[in-house]
């Protein structure tokens, strides 16, 4: 099982100091968080995509490529890649390039996002959110799976004899997770393709997450990819840890009370009871996280949100130390002991390449004019 952290890239005022970091500070902080994630022995760092304040991560591939160059083992992912408003051609190109740069340590999580105005900003209509997600992903798969693509659809200009470059590393495209909080159509899409399903597991009660995951598992089995308990599931969740649970609650409370997504609503205690938010000691985080298995079954990836709501970098790095030293080692051992042998591990590039019979050079070689890119005709010399 994989463990890691994800960031939504918010720039939020620290309520205890009244200070708001700059974009430059938050970008540098995320780089430090990613490096620390590898240093403490976690597996995955994931970064969201947003195109509006108070977020900075409009180009996650750029940031992840930088992180790839400064890490050696860390799996890099997105917390959301907007399949609805990004051009599938650009997604195919950007993530294949990132896959090469990171030596295969890349996957991505597709989602529709939760910012309504982003649709018209990129020339789309939010009422077409689900159809866009379905059509755009079908094209993305085609671009990765086929060397030469002819395609036409409703939301994009047609493609004729198009080859997306670079081709996927070793002939195997990045693994895809489909992220959704409440849309069964997205869970259905993940099941249809045999891809992973990720529930961010932050705002909703366990019963809601359970229904979404169960639906995905049933449809995964329906489409012949394996038994329901072999479906590939990931969960999010936010934690805040201190050695002493009372210290954790006291320190986190002002951040919770003023957070853009939490604040000015239910109390910290109410929210912690009704959702997976866990604020307490390492042992409390261990027990709560192990309990997720009770309602979603055995799953493959657990990501924690730890840098939201204006928490200073020093505090976030301390959270990572606690996760790496006291929480994740126990979770690895306990989840492994409880998982049946037939339930698969999280997909890795190496394992997926091996399943396809080994690596291959997927480069499309073609005679072409260096300027126009058009195939040149041979001229007979007499």
Image: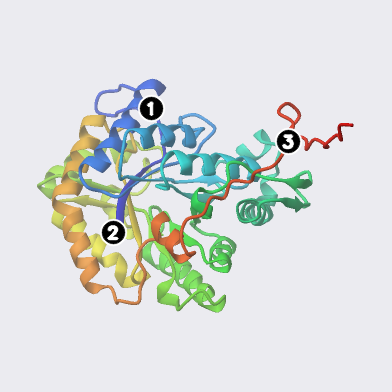
Viewer-nearest of discs 1 and 3 = 3
Q: Which mark is residue 191?
A: none
Observer-nearest of 169 and 25? 169
Viewer-nearest of discs 2 and 3 = 3
Residue 380, given in percent of the width and then of the height, sits at 87, 35
Spatial CA span between label 1 and label 3: 40 Å
**Residue at image mark 2:** 273
Locate residue 163: give its quadrant.
top right
On screen, 38 above or below 373? below
**Residue at image mark 1:** 27
**Residue at image mark 3:** 368
Which circle's residue, 1 or 3, is located before the other in the chain?
1
Q: Quadrant of the N terminus?
A: bottom left
Q: Secondary structure at mark 3?
A: loop
On screen, 352 above or below 241? below
Which circle's residue, 2 or 1, is located before the other in the chain?
1
Observer-nearest of 246 and 135? 135
Q: Residue at x 43, y 47 (%)?
A: 106
Q: Residue at x 30, y 23 (%)?
A: 18
Whether tag 1 and tag 3 are in contact, CB under 8 A, the answer is no
Residue 318, given in percent of the width and then of the height, sits at 18, 38
Query: Farthest left residue?
Result: 244
Query: Farthest right residue?
Result: 382
Q: Residue at x 26, y 60 (%)?
A: 289
244 horizontally vs 279: left or right: left
Query: How dense is the environment of label 1, judged by Cα within 10 Å: few (below 14), some, or many (20 and up)?
Result: some
């Amino acid at each position: 099982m994989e463990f890691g952290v994800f960031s939504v890239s918010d720039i939020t005022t620290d309520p205890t100091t009244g200070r708001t970091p700059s974009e430059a500070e938050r970008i540098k902080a995320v780089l430090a968080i990613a490096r620390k994630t590898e240093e403490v022995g976690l597996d995955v760092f994931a970064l969201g995509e947003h195109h509006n304040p108070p977020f900075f991560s409009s180009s996650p591939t750029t940031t992840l490529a930088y992180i790839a160059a400064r890490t050696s083992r860390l799996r890099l992912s997105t917390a959301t890649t907007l399949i609805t408003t990004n051009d599938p051609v650009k997604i195919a190109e950007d993530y294949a390039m990132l896959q090469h740069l990171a030596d295969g340590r890349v996957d991505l999580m597709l989602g529709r996002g939760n910012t309504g105005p982003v649709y018209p900003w990129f020339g789309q209509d939010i009422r077409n959110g689900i159809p866009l997600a379905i059509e755009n992903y079908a094209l993305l798969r085609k671009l990765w799976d086929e060397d030469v693509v002819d395609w036409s659809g409703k939301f994009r200009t047609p493609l004729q004899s198009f080859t997306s470059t670079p081709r996927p590393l070793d002939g195997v495209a990045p693994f895809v997770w489909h992220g959704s909080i409440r849309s069964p159509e997205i869970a259905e899409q993940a099941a249809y393709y045999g891809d992973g399903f990720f529930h961010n597991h932050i705002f909703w009660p366990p019963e809601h997450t359970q229904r979404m995951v169960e639906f995905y598992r049933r449809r995964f089995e329906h489409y012949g990819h394996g038994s329901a308990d072999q479906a590939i599931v990931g969960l999010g969740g936010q934690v805040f840890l201190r050695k002493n649970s009372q210290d954790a609650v006291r320190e986190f409370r002002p951040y919770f009370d003023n957070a853009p997504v939490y604040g000015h609503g239910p109390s910290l205690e109410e929210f912690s009871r009704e959702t997976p938010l866990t604020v307490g000691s390492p042992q409390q985080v261990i027990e709560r996280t192990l309990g997720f298995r009770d309602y979603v079954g055995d799953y493959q990836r657990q990501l924690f949100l730890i840098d939201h709501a204006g928490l200073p970098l020093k505090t976030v790095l301390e959270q990572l130390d606690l996760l790496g030293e006291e929480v994740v080692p126990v979770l690895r051992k306990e989840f492994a002991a409880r998982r049946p042998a037939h339930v698969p591990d999280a997909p890795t590039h190496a394992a997926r390449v091996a399943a396809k019979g080994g690596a291959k050079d997927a480069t499309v070689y073609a005679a072409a004019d260096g300027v126009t890119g058009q195939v040149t005709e041979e001229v007979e010399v007499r």
